[in-house]
Amino acid sequence: MATCKECKNFFPLTDNPAKGDCVQRVVDPRQAYYKSKPVNAEDDAASCPSFQKRS
């Protein structure tokens, strides 16, 4: 089972590494920006379309 903490897009919080943000870069015709959503480090990422294994 893949978890959020194994993803390149997961950035843990400094005060609580069990929680963090899933940050994704979005590019549309006019601009590029980042989307962020709060997640838990142990959340199941198997069905996440943006999951990228850390190297």
Image (cartoon, rainbow, N blue to C red):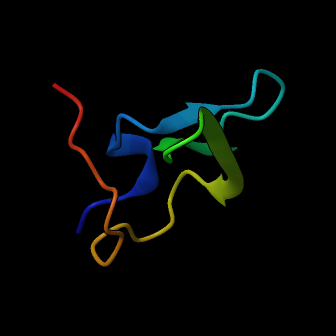
* Figure quadrant of residue 47: bottom left
Horizontally, is 55 left or right of 8 in the view? left
In the image, residue 25 lies at what x, y percent? Answer: 50, 38
Q: Looking at the image, which is closer to me, 14 or 32?
A: 32
Q: Tell me if residue 40 comes above or below residue 44 in the rendering.
A: above
Q: Tell me if residue 45 comes above or below residue 13 in the rendering.
A: below
* Figure quadrant of residue 45: bottom left
Horizontally, is 15 left or right of 12 in the view? right
In the image as oriented, which residue stretches furthest toward the left?
55
Residue 18 appears in the picture as rendered: no
In the image, residue 33 lies at what x, y percent? Answer: 63, 35
Q: Is the N terminus in the top left, top right, bottom left or bottom right quadrant? A: bottom left
Horizontally, is 31 left or right of 9 in the view? right
**Residue occupying the point 41% across, 71% down:** 44
In the image as oriented, which residue stretches furthest toward the bottom?
47
**Residue occupying the point 63% across, 32% down:** 12
Q: Tell me if residue 19 comes above or below residue 11 in the rendering.
A: below
Horizontally, is 15 left or right of 36 in the view? right
In the image as oriented, which residue stretches furthest toward the right?
15
In the image, residue 4 lies at what x, y percent? Answer: 44, 53
Residue 52 appears in the picture as rendered: yes
**Residue occupying the point 70% across, 55% down:** 37
* Figure quadrant of residue 55: top left
In the image, residue 27 lies at what x, y percent? Answer: 47, 42
Q: Looking at the image, which is closer to me, 33 or 12?
A: 33
**Residue occupying the point 58% across, 39% down:** 30
